[in-house]
Amino acid sequence: MIRDEEFETLPRKALEAIKLRRLQHLAERVYATVPFYKKAFDEKGVKPDDITSLEDLQNLPFTLKQDLRDNYPFGMFASPMEDVVRIHASSGTTGKPTVVGYTRQDIDTWSELMARTLAAAGTHKEDIVHNAYGYGLFTGGLGFHYGAERLGASVIPVSGGNTKRQVLLMKDFGPTVLTCTPSYALRLCEVAADEGVDFKSLKFRLGVCGAEPWSEHMRAEIENKLGIDAVDIYGLSEIMGPGVSVECVEAKQGLHVFEDHFIAEIIDPGTGEVLPYGEPGELVFTTLTKEAFPLIRYRTRDLSVLNPEPCKCGRTLVRMGRITGRSDDMLIIRGVNVFPSQIESVLMGRKDVAPYYMLIVDRKEHMDTLEAEIEINEEAFSDSVTDVHAVEEDIQKDIKDILGVSCKVRLVEPRTIQRSEGKAQRVIDKRKL
């Protein structure tokens, strides 16, 4: 369902005219109100009046996560604190958190974008949404909550955790849409089975999953085990929260970026050069309508690709490919770039292991080592004829073929790898780098 026909189906020329006008206004505003941007513009030798086309965006400075931490907590705000009605913060594991603010208009814009997101994913106002994204400083829970209410759907604000109780509520309340991380969707299914509940007997028809990279193989696993359509969404706290882009349930072929609010670029993560459509690289976003916390050319470190071709759903918005990893989460093993999602793609194609794994990176005698602990699935574990060693060797060979580096594989018993109720933690790096 297309919620906003006016903006989601605009011809490219009309859409680009809106983007240019909003970009010009944004540049004038941040130059006048955010000292960081005035200094950054001046150091680049550009002024807001220099922006006469969308191509001029390339002349503007990048914004890095470190810039946000350097201006902690409110130094990047473009609105006075008396106009800020909401503050969220990132869940980063190192350094200071990144703090984001919202005016009342920002909350209204975010709610509408999330209503668009849920509508594109296939949600209707008659639905009951079981919202298992975390509430609090994390933007996911409240973003989905406000969007579902704006759409007119009923919301169960269950948040993350207490998984057994969630299964009970699913049985009793009959929700039809599940919103959570993909890894937690599988966890819910697993706990439901433990409680004697066949997930497919529940009323769910749709899952809207995001907040962590996941593969097509994992989508197939979720759809098969839960009996739902699983749709990918994308967002990050610094840009808005969820509501930046979403797959349409009709095609599931790339995530539609809401370009009337965000400009997406793909750059070479090494050189910063802007890459053409179709070339993979690092996603960079500029916020066009945010009041309290606007950002220009924010480097997300997420790796993707952009496709400007109109979709069969009728939307003309540019589509971004599924996130394949992060440039700053990239592991360098003996000179080879390794992303956890590559190893996941190997595992999700197999029926003898479960989609739970942990990568352990270490350094022994000046040599990097990579080990993967992988859960064997219940059936293979209980099958006395399963040759565990042969399975380990087979997976090792597949990983070597894809990654080009050796990886020791160790199969572990079912349910022994810690489950995540938020973003899945996949890597333990023991190296002293």
Image (cartoon, rainbow, N blue to C red):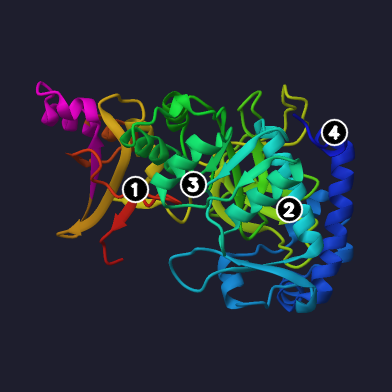
Q: Which mark is residue 110?
A: 2
Kind of residue at disc 2? Trp
Q: Nearer the viewer, mark 3 or mark 2?
A: 2
Residue 319 lies in what quarter of the image? Answer: top right
User: Disc 2, disc 1: CB below 8 Å?
Assistant: no
Q: Residue at x 34, y 36 (%)?
A: 195
Secondary structure category for the residue under label 1? loop
Residue carrying label 1? 419
Kind of residue at disc 3? Glu
In the figure, is residue 326 to the left or right of 32? Answer: left
User: Disc 3, disc 1: CB below 8 Å?
Assistant: no
Pinpoint residue 90: horizontal percent, then vertical percent.
Answer: 55, 64
Quadrant location, the N terminus: top right
Which residue reaches farthest front? 172
Residue carrying label 4? 5
Residue carrying label 3? 212
Q: Earlier in the sequence, mark 2 or mark 1?
A: 2
Q: Earlier in the sequence, mark 3 or mark 4?
A: 4
Kind of residue at disc 4? Glu
Q: Earlier in the sequence, mark 3 or mark 1?
A: 3
Kind of residue at disc 1? Arg
Q: Earlier in the sequence, mark 4 or mark 1?
A: 4
Region of the chain picked out in magenta, as a range = 370-396
Examine the rendering and report whether any part of residue 47 can be seen.
no
Q: Residue at x 87, y 61 (%)?
A: 25
In the figure, is residue 20 to the left or right of 113? Answer: right
Examine the rendering and report whether any part of residue 116 can be seen.
yes
Pinpoint residue 366: horizontal percent, then vertical percent.
Answer: 19, 60
The stretch drawn in magenta includes residue 382: yes
- 381 is higher (above) or lower (below) than 360: above
- Looking at the image, which is closer to me, 166 or 133? 166
